[in-house]
Amino acid sequence: MANEDGHPGSWVESAAPRAAVLTPAGAGAIAVVRVWGERALAVVDAVFLPSSGASLSATRPGRPRLGRLGREGLGDQVVVVVEGPCAVEIQCHGGSAAPRAVMRALAQAGVTPVEPDLAVIQTSASAIQAQANLDLARAATLKCARILLDQSAGALDREIQAIIELIGADRAAALERLEALAALGGLGTRLVRGFTVALAGRPNVGKSRLLNALVGRERALVDPRPGTTRDVVTAAVALGGWPVELMDTAGERAGEGAIERAGIERGRAAREQADLVILVLDISTQLAPADRALIGEPGERLVVANKIDLPPAWPLAEAGAAIGVSAANSEGLGELASLIAGRLVPAPPAPGAAVPFRSIHVETFKRAGELFRAGDAAGAVAILVALGRAG
């Protein structure tokens, strides 16, 4: 992120003109090339031939200019937006040929090409904002992107500064806010990688059909014979706007062969590592000892009674089921999706809130809290300040 005058943020040294293609490689309608550093505007102006009007140097910041790029002005048409004397954005056709031609014209003018990640880092106002900008490109859902966008705009930086100022004025309030930030790390560190939810239960209770229904397509094989699912089948989905990897695990039973037993063991390992386990029961048949054993397993779980489209063999309360659904006709799936989202993120952050989104953030806030409680306020301040400077 550049300052108002177009200069890179103060946490890095300004550089001679550099350029990077910021948009992902491959097909696309538009590609964006950013040029920054000392004399960025002057260098681009020297190789830009406007379709009409004055030169780029006489253009007010923010006004798009149409023209061609190259010393002879023979290149593809581009749109150039001046941010300041040290930052210029060039928009060209997508794909690979047009951005490559733009970068070639800039290189011939003396601009140094760099990798996109370096461009993000060097043009961000702080290390945290640079990290947010990098993760923003990999955000799994729109809701996650909005949270990262808030951090890119400085929400987490401002909260850290507020805590530093509070440490000398209101120790209790400073510690409380540190602990609140650390607690939000459970959500923030999943904005890119997402949550994991494992479907567990006996064979033929409808786990695979339920996964397919939640995803909206045939991802898992459905077969009436037990033991069909012999490995962990995964599918990505957004539930309540949060990214979730659903895992269909092998049904719990006495395996008839080594392959099936191995699949069951993999399923148990997946359940142990999952953020949430959905225990799927078949309400159309009597509860079996294996059902009750799964109900008694420790860990975060949501009990779901499937096949409510069939006559029930037991009441929901008997198994502590939170909800009844039908994977066959999709009854109750919307409510189930909401319940899963609520279990994973019980208290979503307000718009504009500070959210730590990398493990190093969470670890730093926890360590700062420990130092603060031990009476080392200076040490807490030092690691909080260093967090914003870390590369």
Image (tube, rainbow, N blue to C red):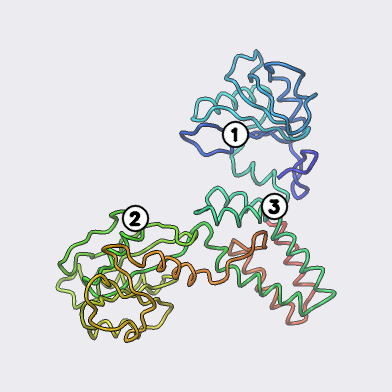
Quadrant containing the C terminus is: bottom right
Q: Earlier in the sequence, mark 1 or mark 2?
A: 1
In this rendering, would 114 be left or right of 138?
A: right
For the N terminus, the image quarter is top right
Residue 108 vertical placement versus 143 (above, below): above
Residue 153's mark?
3
Nearest the eye: 390 or 281 = 281
Which residue is at the front of the view, 161 or 347?
347
In the picture of the structure, the residue carrying the numbered disc 1 is: 32
Amino acid type at circle 3 is Ala
Q: For mark 2, does the 10 Å Cα neighbourhood hold few (<14), some (14 to 19), or many (20 or more) residues?
A: few
Residue 171 position in % (x across, y down): 79, 78
Crowding near the residue tagged with mark 3, few <14, some 14–19, many ≥20 C-alpha atoms within 10 Å: some
Between the C-alphas of marks 2 and 3, the distance is 35 Å
Q: Amino acid at mark 1?
A: Val
Tell me where residue 271 appears, x and y as whole percent.
Answer: 37, 72
Say what secondary structure mark 1 lies in: strand
Circle 3 SS class: loop
Q: Position of residue 331 (x, y in %)?
A: 33, 66
Horizontally, is 338 left or right of 208 in the view?
A: right
For the residue labelled by badge 2, is the local secondary structure a helix, a strand or a loop? loop
Alpha carbon separation for disc pair 3 and 1: 20 Å
Can you give x and y, in whole percent of width and height, for residue 54 in the image? Answer: 77, 18
Which badge, 2 or 3, comes first in the chain's sequence?
Answer: 3
The residue most toward the right is 169
Q: Label 2, on which residue?
A: 216
Residue at 73% from the left image edge and 77% from the top image edge? 175
What residue type is disc 2 on? Gly
